[in-house]
Image: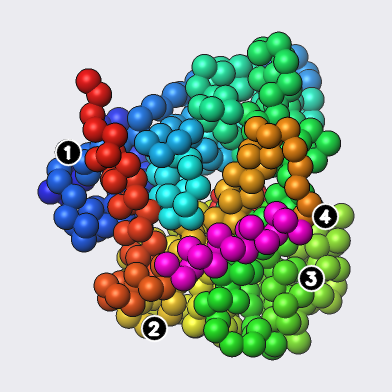
Amino acid sequence: MSIMVPSTTPALITPGRQALDSALHQLDRTAEHLGLDDGLRTMLATPRRSLTVSVPVRREDGRLDVVQGYRVQHNVSRGPAKGGLRFHPAVDIHEVTALAMWMTWKCALVGIPYGGAKGGVAVDPTGLTTRELERLTRRYVNEILPLIGPEKDIPAPDVGTDERTMAWIMDTYSVNTGYSVPGVVTGKPTTLGGSLGRAGATSRGVQIAALAALGRSPEGVTVAVQGFGKVGGPAAQYLADAGCKVVAVSDVSGAVYNAAGLDVARLRAWAAESGGVRGFHQADELPREDLFELDVDVLVPAALEGAITEANAPRVRARLIVEGANGPVTPEADEILAANGTTVVPDILANAGGVIVSYLEWVQNMQAYSWSSGDVELKLRELMLAAYAEVTATAADRGLTLRQAAHVIGVSRVAEAHQMRGLYP
Ligand code: NAD
């Protein structure tokens, strides 16, 4: 049986709808491989809870805007729901559902006791003042308040949100509870109980996965990075620090290229100051889409879903793709890349460093104790490398791609949790 798409599907095929189709397609293939029965497949294909909220925001000029917000808990069979919060104009219920589903498999794959969740608000945060953004965040949190909590569902930063957003969420939740509850979010400022090492954790994980997959000295290995935000920026930096030559980087403003290698630290400073990578004087400009076709060793998509599709996959020349973003390669592109001999280290493995250190942050919060950055980094490395070894071994044993193997491990752990717990009532 193939998995049915939830009946709320609108006629319009949005990028979010495409992401959900990709996630359901991957689950379908995995369930087939594992021989899961129809009932369990449907359980795994459908979110446990989906909440859609209207968020009214008072603008500085007195106008009232109302934006749509979402929180989806895909699965909670292995522990509390966990997942980021995205502020982006293209957010819809389908995208949030897909991202929540990928969180479920990711947490199971790296062996941390969480289910998967995601939240989103369909808004462009760059078009709001800080005060508008704060009001929006606090009102959204108030609307989803019954769902979240340190033992229920723990948000974290994603596209368009950051540690300041997490501080507002922690404060709003705490004010409503009557005492400080740092464990309700991760990715907080360290002064509020954030973990050392969380800010760069996803990127550090990308670096660990990339170096493991390279299997040779990183010295002189050429890299292109799409997206220069919280994941792409530090990932480019860490790969350059390891000896790689980062030759191209893109963000919403454009793309820059330097065959001799970009000075990533300077580029980060430039992007922070000018609002984007475009115009960086020690590089040539490149049409944004051309970044995927560069003759590089490693390509790191670290922006949004659906970056590499059947349209551009045939022109990808990188031998290795390490997915910093969630869902950047469509299933059709996956097949083309596999046929062309390109190795893809999948999102649920490559970008798991973020949720791993989020888990470490939450453990520290629950113990009211904080660990050194060395302890955090050691644990991150240990969990990333253990998951990487398991995925590569499963892929070799079963003749699967790394993505298929990662999904087989993640989905089978969640399926097993369901089978062990049984069905209530
Ligand atoms: P961010 O908002 O900090 O950065 C996003 C970056 O992508 C920005 O530089 C933006 O300019 C760029 N971008 C957007 N559209 C682009 C396009 N068409 N071409 C080139 N660049 C484009 O977000 P982030 O937190 O870095 O998240 C990036 C990806 O990583 C997302 O898929 C997210 O779900 C995933 N992820 C994030 C974390 C985390 O801890 N933040 C953890 C795991 C996965």
Disc 3 marks which amino acid? Val
Which numbered disc, 3 or 4, marks the residue that appears first in the sequence? Answer: 3
- Separation (CA) of disc 4 from disc 2: 37 Å
**Counting other residues with Cα less than 10 Å from the Cα at mark 4, is it few (<14), some (14-19), or many (20 or more)?**
few
Badge 4 residue CB within 8 Å of ligand 1: no
Magenta-tinted stretch? 374-390
Instruction: Say which of marks 1 and 3 sits in front.
Output: 1
- Separation (CA) of disc 3 from disc 4: 12 Å
Report if the CB atoms under discs 3 and 2 are less than 8 Å apart.
no
Badge 3 residue CB within 8 Å of ligand 1: no
Name the residue carrying label 4: 272
Q: Nearer the viewer, residue 94 or 345?
A: 345
The disc placed on residue 341 is: 2
Which quadrant of the figure has residue 48? top left
Name the residue carrying label 3: 264
Label 2 SS: loop
- Across and down, in percent, residue 395 comes to 34, 72
- Separation (CA) of disc 4 from disc 1: 50 Å
Which numbered disc, 1 or 3, marks the residue that appears first in the sequence? Answer: 1
Disc 1 marks which amino acid? Gly
> Would residue 132 be seen by someone viewing this image from the given angle?
no
Which quarter of the rendered picture does the C terminus lie within? top left
- Across and down, in percent, residue 251 comes to 67, 60
Residue drawn at 76 percent across, 64 percent down? 278
Residue 376: say if magenta: yes
Which numbered disc, 1 or 2, marks the residue that appears first in the sequence? Answer: 1
- Separation (CA) of disc 1 from disc 2: 36 Å
Name the residue carrying label 1: 39
Residue 8: say if magenta: no
- Across and down, in percent, residue 21 comes to 32, 49
Q: Nearer the viewer, residue 116 or 193?
A: 193
